[in-house]
Amino acid sequence: MTMKKLFIGGLALALLVSASENAAAQEEKKMTRDEYVAQMADLTGREGTAKGQIETLDAEIEALKAQLAQLDRDNADLNAQILTAVSATDAQVKAFGKNLDSIAAQLEGLLALAPEVLIQRRGEVNDLAAQVGELKENKISALPEMAAQLADIDKMIAQLKARVAQPVTIDYTVAKGDNLWNISKMERIYADPYMWPRLYRANKEQIQDPDLIYPDQTLAVPFGVAENQHLVTRGDFLFKIAAEVYNDGGKWHKIYEANKQQIVEPHLIFPAQVLELPSN
């Protein structure tokens, strides 16, 4: 009898617990649905706000597109005015730009050369510099894009001329019929026959008589001078050199005093002499 009562009591307790859990689950389910509804309302509100912002941004984008289109038209008008001002067509401007591109590419190639190779191709540097000078006479060179490219080209030419001016020595193998005069006259050597004394001085150890050189002799050919030196060329005189170096021709006596050993008379200097230049 006691066991039966216990069983009935336990069953009743279990039913009560199960009913309580079901009630709690129902309550929990109801709370989740409420939260969901609240979240949906929040998202709906955000969506509406976002749509409003998108519409505003779309309007701003359209306004920017209109501004860009106007700028394009203004640029086209400005370019047309510039072309009229420089008396050139669009095709001529493009051709001018391609010419500059070609010159820049050639200069870059020369900059990549070893000093001893570059010195023998210095004529190309001078030719390109001359071409650039002619191009600068064209009104198209005043266009901003062209002017900027010309400025870069000028820098490369300056670098090349500085490298060509630096001291460097190459070898020359004497051929049958050569003499110092003719060798000096060669374009790839000095392009000036009056520079032959420089070859002679650089090779005194193997040239006893400047009128006698022999096939297969290897001569040292010096180019350029140090920064504090000046290589005399035809037409030079001390006053002129001082004017170039010190911006004052009256200081010629400074050069004379520093080079008395090789200058017999102040008014007599000769091509191929290398003069020391004292500091100002």
Image (tube, rainbow, N blue to C red):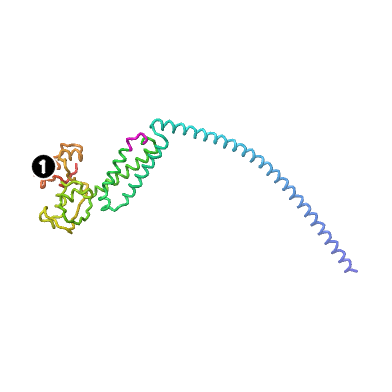
Q: How many marks?
A: 1
Residue 214 spot, x, y in % from top left? 14, 57
**Where is 90 relative to 118, above or below?**
above
Give the position of the N terminus as an image quadrant.
Answer: bottom right
Q: Amino acid at mark 1?
A: Leu
What secondary structure is the magenta-colored segment mainly?
A: helix
Q: Which residues are magenta?
A: 135-140
Secondary structure under the numbered disc 1 in the rendered image: loop
Name the outermost residue toward the left.
264
Is 183 left or right of 163, judged from the image as shown?
Answer: left
Name the outermost residue toward the right.
1
Instruction: Judge whether residue 103 is colored magenta.
Output: no
Circle 1 sits on which residue? Answer: 268
Is 249 left or right of 116, judged from the image as shown?
Answer: left
Quick one: label 1, few (<14), some, or many (20+) residues within 10 Å?
Answer: few
Give the position of the C terminus as an image quadrant.
Answer: top left
**Where is 7 relative to 62, above or below?**
below
